Image: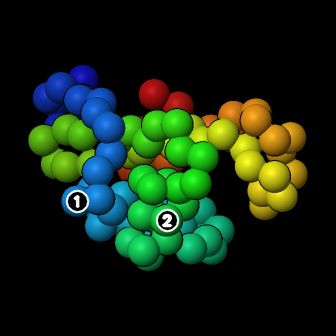
């Protein structure tokens, strides 16, 4: 159940979700003060249509996108230093959702 009292749906992220996903990142930045790229073009290139993308999912409730998670296969020379072929998981949740 979501903060709005309704159900949460998980589905594959699509290009039409990038503005809302960008909003999730901006909410995280506002709450943590930790700067990171968050514009829609970055979200599309690094999550929804990322090279090595296995799946990018959004969590949606009655208010819209409340979070997303990206799973990509590590490519050679990735920015995280993860060995090639391993999975890189990136969950992002806004508002009161972290830890739920």
Q: Position of residue 94 (x, y in %)?
A: 41, 51
Sooner in the amino-acid sequence: mark 2 or mark 1: 1
Total marks placed: 2
Mark 1 Cα-neighbour bin, 10 Å: few <14, some 14–19, many ≥20: few
Q: Quick one: SS at disc 2?
A: helix
Q: Quadrant of residue 86?
A: top right
Between 50 and 5, the one lying in front of the other is 50
Q: Quadrant of the N terminus?
A: top left
Is residue 79 at least partly visible in the picture?
yes
Q: Position of residue 78 (x, y in %)?
A: 78, 56
Question: What residue is at 22 percent from the left and 59 percent from the top?
Answer: 16
* Residue 58 vertical placement versus 6 (above, below): below
Q: Which residue is mark 2?
A: 45
Q: Quadrant of residue 7?
A: top left
Q: Quick one: SS at disc 1?
A: helix
Q: Position of residue 19 (x, y in %)?
A: 29, 67
Q: Which residue is mark 1?
A: 16
Between 12 and 3, the one lying in front of the other is 12
């Amino acid at each position: 159940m979501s903060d709005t009292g309704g159900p949460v749906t998980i589905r594959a992220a699509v290009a039409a979700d990038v503005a809302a996903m960008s909003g999730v990142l901006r909410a995280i930045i506002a709450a943590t003060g930790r700067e990171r790229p968050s514009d829609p073009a970055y979200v599309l290139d690094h999550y929804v249509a990322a090279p090595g993308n296995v799946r990018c999912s959004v969590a949606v409730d009655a208010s819209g996108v409340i979070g997303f998670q990206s799973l990509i296969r590590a490519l050679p020379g990735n920015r995280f230093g993860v060995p090639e072929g391993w999975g890189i998981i990136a969950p992002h949740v806004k508002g009161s959702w972290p830890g739920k």
